[in-house]
Image: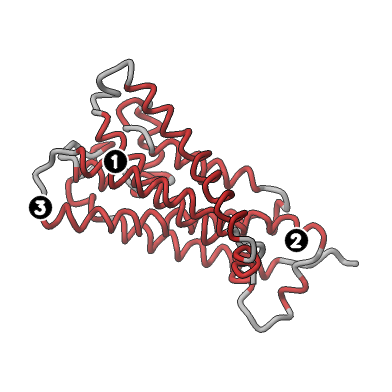
Amino acid sequence: MWVRSTMTYRFSFAMTLLSNLAATAFDFVVILLMFSQVRGLGGFSFAEVAFLYGTTGTAFGLADLALGQVQRLGRRVRDGTLDTLLVRPVPVLAQVAADRFALRRLGRVTQGLLVLVWSLVLLDLDWTPAKAVLVPLMVVGGWLIFSSVMVAGAAFQFLAQDAAEVTNSFTYGGNTLLQYPPTIFATDLVRGVVYVVPLAFVNWVPALYVLGRELPAGLPGWAAFGSPVVAAVFCGAAGLAWRVGLRSYRSTGS
């Protein structure tokens, strides 16, 4: 319904999509300006940083397109309008994700994908079948990891009712963090996103293997292929958190 509504005014949609693409592109413009003054960043070349940016940007864009609306759940919990979703014969999570579905977020996906393709053209790598398979695998795995964090954050809103910014610190904040090489961050921070909240498996861990660099925080080489496992664990944990949160919902009492 929301897609049909959006496509009714196609020129308006095209302008909105273009605006969204341009707005997200400013993040990459910062990297371009940075490399206009330096030759490397933390030992990484421009093409390598662009590769990190493109992989996490595409993965996050897909998650934001599919589940970006779940951050509105806190408002429904506060005003009790979630009750209307509970009586419909459709999964509540699907309804929350589809509510006011914003097709314009394709602009973020497109921008991240363009940078990713450009970086692959610029990179001079010794490609192997394992590395070639790992590129789409990390994008899909990152998509699932970011999506799981969004669902877990939505489940937390059943208790906090207004915790969208907490989730954003891990989603938008994690996306920004992973756009840059781990060598520019403090060791404790890198270990935190590897072992505590393993967002590093979105792109740092597999991408460094593709680039032929040492994996962060002392991880062994085989860990580069662990993104699907981490994504599966994230999805399971997020699903459990959602079920617990939904069962704890008691409406507004009105």
Front-most of 234 and 196?
Answer: 234
Q: Is residue 227 above or below residue 27?
A: below
Please count the marks in the image: 3
Regarding residue 60, the answer to whether it shows in the image is yes
Q: Secondary structure at mark 2?
A: helix
Q: Secondary structure at mark 1?
A: helix
Query: Which residue is found at the position 43% from the left and 59% from the top?
Result: 234
Q: How is the image coloured?
A: secondary structure
Structural crowding at the residue carrying mark 2, measured as other residues with C-alpha within 10 Å and reported as few (<14), some (14–19) or many (≥20): some
Return the disc, 1 or 3, that comes first in the chain's sequence: 1
Disc 1 and disc 3 in contact, CB within 8 angstroms: no
Where is residue 176? Give x, y as percent.
45, 37
Q: Is residue 166 left or right of residue 83?
A: left
Measured Cα–Cα span from mark 1 to mark 3: 17 Å
Q: Is residue 149 left or right of residue 81?
A: left
Q: Which of pointers 2 and 3 indicates the residue nearer the eye?
A: 3
Regarding residue 152, the answer to whether it shows in the image is no
Quarter of the image with the C terminus in it: bottom right
Label 1 sits on residue: 51
Query: Which residue is found at the position 16% from the left and 52% from the top?
Result: 131
Structural crowding at the residue carrying mark 1, measured as other residues with C-alpha within 10 Å and reported as few (<14), some (14–19) or many (≥20): many
Label 2 sits on residue: 76
Disc 2 and disc 3 in contact, CB within 8 angstroms: no
Name the residue type under label 3: Thr
Measured Cα–Cα span from mark 2 to mark 3: 49 Å
Name the residue type under label 2: Arg
Q: Is residue 134 left or right of residue 187?
A: left
Label 3 sits on residue: 128
